[in-house]
Amino acid sequence: MSKWKELEEELKAIVKKSGYDNEIALCTSNRPDLGEYQINDAMKLAKVYHKNPLSIATDILENLKQDNHFVNVNIAGAGFINISLSNSFLVDFMNEIKEDIKLNIDKQEKKLIIIDYGGANVAKALHVGHLRSADIGEALNRLAKLVGHNTIADVHFGDSGLQSGIVIMELESMFPNLICFKNDYSGEEFELPITKEDLKVIYPNGSKKTKENEELLEKARQITYQIQNGHIGYNKLWDKITEISISDIKETYKKLNANFDLWEGERDSFKYIPEMFTHLQKQDLIYTSEGAKVMDVKDEKDDKEIPPIILEKSNGAYLYATTDLATIYGRVKRFAPDEIWYTTDLRQELHFLQVFRAAKKSGIITKTKLGFYGFGTMNGIDGKPFKTRTGGVMSLEDLISLVKKECYERINDNIVDPDKKEETAQIIAIAALKYADLLPFRETDCIFDPAKFSDLEGKTGPYLLYSTIRIKSLLKKAKEENIEYKKFTKINSKTEKDIIINLLNMPSVINRAYESKSLNEVAEYIYKLTSSYNKFYSENKILSEKDADLKTSWLILSKVVYDTNMLLLDLLGIECPEKM
Ligand code: ARG
């Protein structure tokens, strides 16, 4: 149990001893001049116990005063209790966590959670939406593991949509003699003469044609339908394209430190579709509307119209909802997860609402909890969806390059070897992007501003990396000078106390991030902790301090901040370079 939790338990016991048996919450103070923490529950207790809040607060205060963990306890206003922590309590805390920062994390009851994020589309370029899904999804995955859950991360590629028909149509016009296009083709091997670079232009070319020509669009739809229905030649060809594209996409995810356990896609759900339809039909949930197979998912309590979910088009083709529902069917059957989380653009909210309702209504899920954790749009500096100069969607690759260029320029040539510069810029760029992506609340739109993201000062990834590396080199110097630091004994200044209080508060930040499925408070927290440490760093000369106990305590403080930063940066999926 974290010290934070212990403290909450202790306060609960005190409140109980004062005659009030209720849950209470420890809150960080918004009036630090009055105390470091607040207990704001007297009003709530007043309602339960029909007593005046001030007299309740006074009862509690008497008992708080008896406990030597607290100092400066006082009541403000109508019954707000302010408390501060004694130095001896904080010293003990530092000694408890100094070797293993993970002791400062509260574990939850273990669950199995499947996390569906990434969602790149095969044979199409990744864009900023996929960046957000990878960043946020990966951080949520790491968060779930940190608090003790088992997770299965599934990239859920988009590999069954119209792009398959478009790309194959385009390839047929480029290479009409490929054997897979022959009528009597029965699955023989063949060489597909294209590279991942070719693939980058094939889809856009084909897509443009289908927009200009209705007949070609219909042809692409037809091919898509045939792939879904087992056409041997098209499937063989699409497998090959998928292979080329996925190896490329995997490289991008690797750059983004996004790690998946399952590299599956929409197509992997095809094998569950017939079973799923039987399951739905048995319950009479499916009906035909304008030739399409649909299912009602509306609810009496809805305050807006929730349209039926379409599971098969009139031409027999499957849709996004079909593969998502069948994927749930398969996941439940294979893994029986406690929860499945989805991280996509908020604009897909209705889709997931329909799919979740269909899954519940039909009993495809019974105990599994489904969660949609959508994110806002990444806009340009003008506040409009981020576009290239020519008005197209900016590819993720170009986006990373833009930030990398900014970061490259800011690298200190006196510190980083020329042959390490490229690699270092890459690590910093990813940190810059990820931090900026995770800093706003998940649902808030954010602004893509490469120069700002890459700044070495302010709330940025590079600032945090720079500061963390500086602590690391301090600890390295201490080691080179054979300085041992074993026991934390002294808190010498308000700045030091602030840092320790921040460290103590970490579990509450992690717990709230888990509740809200948003890393914004964690991102803010690292900044706050780092800034308070940097203040301390500039106020003191740690290695030349004469008072041995103080120097030891300072080094321990530095180590714990360093470990915390590394733990939390890793939680955000951010790596730290050696130097920068
Ligand atoms: N491929 C989709 C897209 O690019 C995202 C997939 C999200 N996951 C899911 N299970 N639908 O929008």
Image: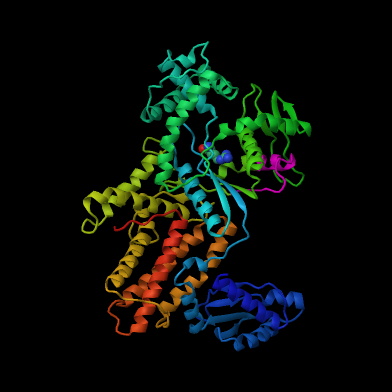
**Residue drawn at (65%, 32%) of the image:** 272
What is the x, y in percent for residue 406?
31, 50
Name the image quarter holding residue 268. top right
**Residue drawn at (39%, 57%) of the image:** 461
**Residue drawn at (62%, 57%) of the image:** 110
What is the x, y in percent for residue 546?
29, 84
Instruction: Answer with left or right where residue 148 lies relative to residue 45.
Output: left
Q: Give 422 or 56, whichever is nearer the viewer.
A: 422
What is the x, y in percent for residue 143?
53, 56
Name the image quarter holding residue 328. top right
**Is residue 97 magenta-colored?**
no
Quarter of the image with the N terminus is: bottom right
Q: Report whether residue 328 is seen.
A: yes
The relative height of residue 33 versus residue 383 in the rendered view (above or below) is below
Q: Report whether residue 211 is seen.
A: no
The relative height of residue 110 versus residue 502 in the rendered view (above or below) is above
Q: Give 541 or 476, whichever is nearer the viewer.
A: 476
**Is residue 364 magenta-colored?**
yes
**Residue drawn at (57%, 34%) of the image:** 266
Instruction: Answer with left or right where residue 373 lies relative to residue 578.
Output: right
**Can you tell me which quadrant of the image ligand 1 is in?**
top right
Q: Give 462 or 240, whichever is nearer the viewer.
A: 240
What is the x, y in percent for residue 520?
50, 58
Which range of residues does the magenta coloring cover? 353-372
Count all numbered tags in the image, as a single digit.
0
Quarter of the image with the C terminus is: bottom left
Colour scheme of this structure image?
A: rainbow
